[in-house]
Image (cartoon, coloured by chain):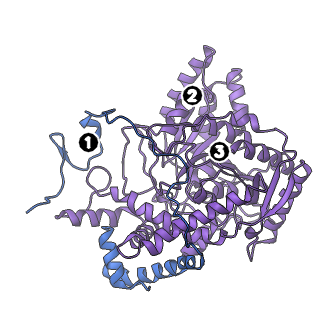
Amino acid sequence: MAIDAATVRKVARLARIREPEERLEPLAQELNTIISWIEQLEEVDTDGVEPMTSVVAVALPLRDDVVTEGGDTRRILSNAPKSADGFFIVPKVVE
Amino acid sequence: MSDLTKLTLKAALAGLKARDFSSVDITKAHIEAIEQARGLNAYVLETPDRALAMAAASDERLARGEGGALEGAPLGIKDLFCTEGVRSTAASKILGNFVPAYESTVTTQLWRDGAVMLGKLNLDEFAMGSSNETSAFGPVINPWRRSGSDAALTPGGSSGGSAAATAADLCLAATATDTGGSIRQPASFTGTVGIKPTYGRCSRWGIVAFASSLDQAGPIAKTVEDAAIMLRSMSGHDVKDSTSLPVEVPDFASYVGKSVKGLRIGVPKEYRIPGMPAEIEKLWADGIAWLKDAGCEIVEVSLPHTKYALPAYYIVAPAEASSNLARYDGMRYGLRAGGPSLTDVYEESRAQGFGEEVKRRILIGTYVLSAGYYDAYYLKAQKVRRRIADDFDQAWQSCDALLTPTTPSAAFALGEQSDDPIAMYLNDIFTVTTNLAGLPGLSLPAGRDAQGLPLGLQLIGRALDEGTLFSLAGALEKAAGFTAKADRWW
């Protein structure tokens, strides 16, 4: 499956990265080169193979659902590009 | 006192304990060396005041006859580890002037053991790269040069700053991370020792995430024993990382110098790739002969899915990266650009904040995870990954560890491979398999090419069997007798 400029536009939109129109075609070519190299995986017989989801054969640990840290608004906001009154200030989301 | 930077970590710790010199002495010596080596671009942030304060505190503890396993030893920290109150960037513009309000578990353990932080080390942006050229701070320069040439070479990547700083005596040892070879390839390019331990040995908490199922921290050091000392402090179970293993941390250094007699060493035939330089073939043959002399039995093994490891990696790693890097949205920290709408801010912040290679990988990851392609790419790659892990399990039936070259070439010149992503990706051809399978891999310097550049050998072990790797690496280190250092030009 070849990637064209329209696909790159769609994927960039999904990834929330602005790509200027003139970059779409060169990016499509780059991604095609990489994806067609990746597609050699089709040669591998994986019928009946369980996908590997974890490299470590242990069950995910559970802990009690209790607060361990928190109540430190100042530290949480310390890197905010914009904040006021203990809140992050973000662009308007609803009209 | 000027030679304090030339000490190994082990010798420095002994000297500190014996009070032959103070931590302030050895820290000052390193601070001066760093100031004189700015041309290497190894440090993206120097923290001399903090270093001297930590050193003074160490000296007080040493004076009382106290102190931890790394008491007073000045180290460099890859700028992928969050350090409380000290700017942490992952070498990306998108993190800007991010100052963490918390400390990574690995560095917390280093300070617990008395280590001193000299500063933060350069890397490829978000650890995505094999040459350090994707760093927002510009590339690190390898202290090594080809004989008779002053061309700037890459120290490898992504832990290029860690490797260059260790090789140039700008720290006693450094922290690093490895997702596809980012500890071992730079170690090989700079004549240093690096180990990526078993996945889950070191907590990932507080390390900027790239590909969570592959990322693992480890040290870069001057000797095998130094790497073992570092790894012990860096390892250990952490409830803040659910993939961290609840297992005991061995005294890794106690394995260095142990006899390797009777160990069976596998030589995987698939690692003999077409076009491999004769010098690397020879280095590999030397390694085999040295281990044979030390009493090991050499067996040929087959890892039939080796050639599929890199393509599988370039699905799994970008997919996980596209998910992990979704957090950089310009809202809570880092760069905020564009406007006025929310989507404009997201798209513009990420367009301006991420470099080209990071964007490329996010786009690939988003594509392979997008509707309709998940099974064809991500699921397929996870199945191939299982095949690769099964290959190793099969190999362990007939051997105890594997010996391979670390990289298919010596350090290359800056700019030489940056136009061709796939050529760059091939740097990790021998290292990436262990990340996919979660196994430990160690690189040590074992020889030099015709131009005088260091070359590394890699040992791969069973899960949690770093001890055997340290014993074998100790034997190889002794046999290879690699003591060369880069001629100082900086």
- Residue drawn 38% across the image and 41% down it: B100
Q: Chain of mark 1?
A: A
What is the drawing colour of chain B? purple
Going by the numbered disc 2, the residue's amino acid type is Gly
Cα distance, mark 2 to mark 1?
31 Å
Going by the numbered disc 1, the residue's amino acid type is Leu
- Residue drawn 79% across the image and 47% down it: B472
Which numbered tag is attached to residue A77?
Answer: 1
Q: Chain of mark 2?
A: B
Cα distance, mark 1 to mark 3?
40 Å
Judge whether residue B3 can be spotted in this image: no
Going by the numbered disc 3, the residue's amino acid type is Leu
Q: Which residue is mark 2?
A: B114
Residue B286 image point, x, y percent: 86, 59
Q: Helix, strand or loop at disc 1?
A: loop
Q: Helix, strand or loop at disc 3?
A: loop
Q: Which residue is mark 3?
A: B464
- Residue drawn 68% across the image and 22% down it: B17
Number of the front mark, 3 or 2 = 3
Q: Which chain has been coloured blue in this picture?
A: A
Label 2–label 1 contact, CB within 8 A: no
- The N terminus of chain A, quarter of image: bottom left
Residue B168 image point, x, y percent: 66, 48
> Toward which corner of the image does residue B306 lie, by quadrant?
bottom right
Residue B386 image point, x, y percent: 58, 63
> Toward which corner of the image does residue B94 lie, by quadrant?
bottom left
